[in-house]
């Protein structure tokens, strides 16, 4: 399926928060990541209340550093106590949490849920594939994109240059580093 090279370039401090009430879906997601040789840290929460407590360092998570934020959150919608849409609303309201990419990984294909999640600031909305191999591949693709390929806003805020070699290679057309400000060749 996937090799360890798929995770090359992942920041050592990157981690994933999986918020899923179904023990079956939670285990399948964790199994997919292990099978894909994901070696990073994964924290799990069984409902929205537990997820917010984990992030804030409250309740059973007291003593946890609330500044230690996940690189991405995989969030189910239909959960007891506090559903995924309400959690998303709280995440995007909070200054510390707002920039964490949130991927809605759900069985809900309802247009209303899709529209609401994007309106609240979800970064992606993925309906869980029913076929097991497609589900595993979807989980690996999500993880690889958000933990390896994506460059989060916190890098710009903190001056972090994670993955410098792969993101800052010289642009042959302009002679400047990729992503470096300047005049595009068409504008010269």
Image: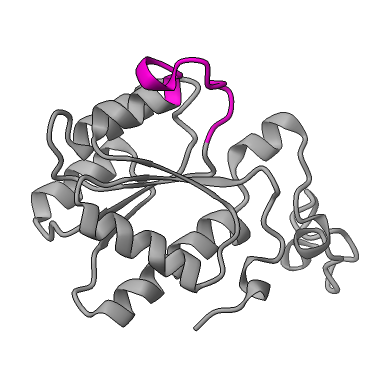
Q: Is residue 90 visible?
A: yes
- How far across and down, in percent of the image, does residue 178 sit? 78, 60
> Overall secondary structure of the magenta stretch?
loop
Residue 157 vertical position relative to residue 110 in the rendered view, above or below: above
The residue shown at (30%, 29%) is 50
Image quadrant assignment for residue 171: bottom right
Locate residue 69 relative to residue 174 in the image: left or right. left
Viewer-proximal residue, 45 or 159?
A: 45
User: Does the magenta segment cover residue 97?
Assistant: no
Residue 62 vertical position relative to residue 36 in the rendered view, above or below: above
- How far across and down, in percent of the image, does residue 80 sit? 12, 35
The residue shown at (31%, 25%) is 90
Q: Please identify the quadrant where the C terminus is shown.
A: bottom right
- Residues in magenta? 55-69
- The residue lying furthest to the right in this view is 175
Q: Is residue 89 visible?
A: no
Viewer-proximal residue, 158 or 11?
A: 11
Colour setting: one colour
Image quadrant assignment for residue 109: bottom left
The residue shown at (56%, 63%) is 38
Q: How many marks?
A: 0
Locate residue 130 relative to residue 31 in the image: left or right. left
Image quadrant assignment for residue 2: bottom right
Residue 16 vertical position relative to residue 89 in the rendered view, above or below: below
- How far across and down, in percent of the image, does residue 83 sit? 17, 35
Locate residue 144 relative to residue 52 in the image: left or right. right
Locate residue 158 relative to residue 154 in the image: left or right. right
- How far across and down, in percent of the image, does residue 77 sit? 19, 45
The residue shown at (62%, 72%) is 6
User: Does the magenta segment cover residue 59?
Assistant: yes
């Amino acid at each position: 399926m996937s090799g360890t090279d798929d995770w090359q370039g992942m920041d050592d401090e990157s981690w994933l928060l999986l918020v899923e009430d179904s023990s079956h879906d939670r285990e399948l997601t964790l199994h997919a990541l292990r099978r894909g040789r994901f070696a990073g840290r994964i924290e799990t929460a069984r409902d929205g209340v537990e997820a917010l407590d984990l992030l804030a360092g409250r309740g059973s998570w007291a003593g946890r550093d609330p500044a230690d934020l996940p690189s991405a959150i995989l969030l189910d919608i239909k959960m007891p106590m506090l559903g995924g849409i309400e959690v998303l609303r709280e995440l995007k309201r909070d200054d510390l949490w707002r920039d964490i990419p949130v991927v809605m990984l759900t069985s809900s294909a309802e247009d209303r849920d899709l529209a609401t999640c994007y309106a609240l600031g979800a970064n992606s909305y993925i309906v869980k594939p029913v076929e097991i191999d497609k589900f595993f591949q979807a989980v690996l693709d999500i993880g690889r994109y958000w933990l390896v390929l994506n460059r989060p806003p916190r890098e710009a805020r903190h001056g972090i240059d994670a993955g410098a070699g792969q993101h800052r290679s010289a642009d042959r057309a302009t002679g400047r580093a990729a992503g470096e400000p300047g005049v595009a060749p068409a504008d010269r």
